[in-house]
Amino acid sequence: MLLVMLLCVSISVYAKEKLIWLTDDQTELVNYLNDEHVSIGTDTSKLVIKSLLKLYDIDIQLVQVPRINALLISSPNVCTSNRIKSEQRIKENIFSAPVNLFPSIRLYFLDDIRYVQGRDLFKPLLNQKGELISLALLFRTFPELVLGVSKGRSFGKALDSQLNTLSQKNILIRAGIGRYKSLTKMLFKKRIDFLLKFPTELKRELTYTTGKVQISSLAIAHSAKYIVGHIACSQSETGGRVIKHTNKILQQLYRQAKFYQAHSRYLNSGDLANFNRYYQEVYQTPVPLRPPINE
């Protein structure tokens, strides 16, 4: 009897705390747990998750964004990756230090879109830096065109504010699993006219596209140079512990070449000089271009 009690105590001491990790990307159910290189968001998050698995029993679940938002408030042991901070989300969740950074969102469109053919009409929409002055001006000028948007996705405070001013006739909102790829396909098939995307996302999706697609993009004035993603957890004791452990893991990762490469492998060489400045600014550490001997 004593032996059984000691065994039960031993098991309870070493039992890992249960943690539910939510994602809206079906591929991450597998890719978070393998060694494949997939994307900045997946590759950086899996480096953190790999370390957290030593401490927690993590159950990765596929959930749509609106449900993720709700569970992060209602459940005490829920976390998710690649979360952009907003004023409302900070009130509802606990956020980690930066986990990944992406060159800023751009507005993408096909080269044969109607308004591009009229270059003289297009010029007044741009500032001296060649940036789109605003989404509102774009759709005042071309009220018949449509922007595709993923339901529940935040693009940061500045762009979210611009989106909120647009007429519903100029926005097509797509929900459901696989909506990111679906919106890109809709753009390629000319079912929508514009799409807001990170450059790395579009580069990845173009690799799966058959046939030649001529696509252009614009930076949007007053939007951030880059977007920072975080891990967010429930405002609970469990959530606080996970974020504390996550931040310790991140402070080590920032100085490791594998973490830098989890970003840089998805960027064009011409974008690396700017990205290296962003890396030092966000992570407050020199760029770890060379891996340590023992890495």
Image (spheres, rainbow, N blue to C red):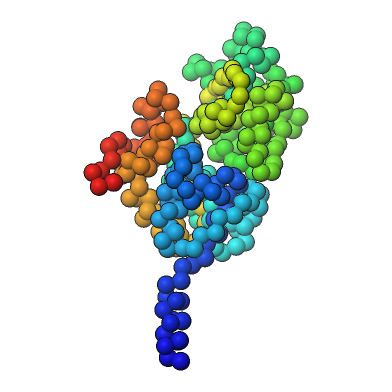
Q: What residue is drawn where x is 44% and y is 29%? A: 267
Foreground of the two, 74 or 17: 17
Count of labels shown?
A: 0
Residue 240 coordinates in the image, percent (x, y): 47, 62
Which residue sits at x=69%, y=43%? Answer: 176
Q: Indicate left or right for 74 with 247 as reference.
A: right
Question: Please, which residue is most extreme toward the bottom here?
Answer: 1
Task: Identify whether 33 is placed above or below 211.
Answer: below
Q: Residue furthest left?
A: 293
Against 143, residue 92 (above or below) is below
Q: Position of residue 58 (x, y in %)?
A: 51, 60
Q: Is residue 154 left or right of residue 104?
A: right
Residue in the image at 33% along x and 50% along y: 252
- Using the image, determine if residue 2 lies above or below residue 87: below
x then y, percent, for residue 88: 58, 49
Q: Would residue 136 be seen by someone viewing this image from the given angle?
A: no
Residue 189 position by quadrant: top right
Looking at the rendering, which quadrant does residue 112 occupy?
A: top right
Q: Position of residue 13 (x, y in %)?
A: 42, 75
The residue shown at (57%, 44%) is 27
Whether residue 259 is visible, yes or no, is yes
Q: Is residue 227 left or right of residue 174?
A: left
**Most foreground residue, 213 or 133:** 213
Using the image, determine if residue 277 lies above or below residue 54.
Answer: above
Q: Nearer the viewer, residue 31 or 49?
A: 31
